Image (spheres, helix red, strand yellow):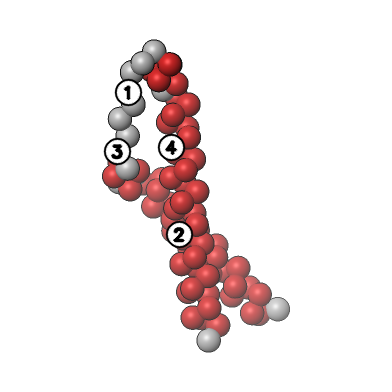
Amino acid sequence: MIYIKALLVGTLTLLLSIVVYVVIAIWITSRKYAALRTSGGLIGFDLRSLVYSPLFWLVAIAGFVLGAIWILRGATT
């Protein structure tokens, strides 16, 4: 049962870390190109480019692992 709980919490933290990563990436990108936006230019953003980034996968896997370890550590104490 503890492994199922660790899997579910790991999946939840994986999804949460993906959402946080996408929000931060969009915020940083919009800040980076703020001069274009004020001059009337358009900013094109491709969400698929985030998924192909190795940093995306590192954040996603780290979120899953940290969530699962958090539950498994609590079970051993």
Mark identifier at residue 8: none
Per the model, the C-alpha gap separating discs 1 and 2 is 30 Å
Nearer the observer: mark 1 or 2; the answer is 1
Q: Which residue type carries mark 1?
A: Leu
Q: Which residue type carries mark 3?
A: Asp
> Residue tagged by mark 3?
46
Per the model, the C-alpha gap separating discs 1 and 4 is 14 Å
The residue at 48%/74% (across/down) is: 7
Of the pair 36 and 32, the residue shown nearer to us: 36
| x, y percent for residue 37 | 40, 20
Among the two numbered marks 4 and 2 on one chain, the one whose residue lies closer to the N terminus: 2
Q: Is residue 31 above or below residue 56?
A: above
The residue at 43%/45% (across/down) is: 22
Q: Residues within 10 Å of mark 3 (few under 14, many from 20)?
A: few
Among the two numbered marks 1 and 4 on one chain, the one whose residue lies closer to the N terminus: 4
Q: Secondary structure at mark 1?
A: loop
Looking at the image, do the residues carrying marks 3 and 2 touch, with CB atoms under 8 Å apart?
Answer: no
Q: Residues within 10 Å of mark 1 (few under 14, many from 20)?
A: few
Q: Which residue type carries mark 2?
A: Leu
Residue ranking furthest to the right: 77
Q: Which residue type carries mark 4?
A: Ile
> Residue tagged by mark 2?
15
The residue at 60%/68% (across/down) is: 70
| x, y percent for residue 3 | 51, 81
> Residue tagged by mark 4?
26
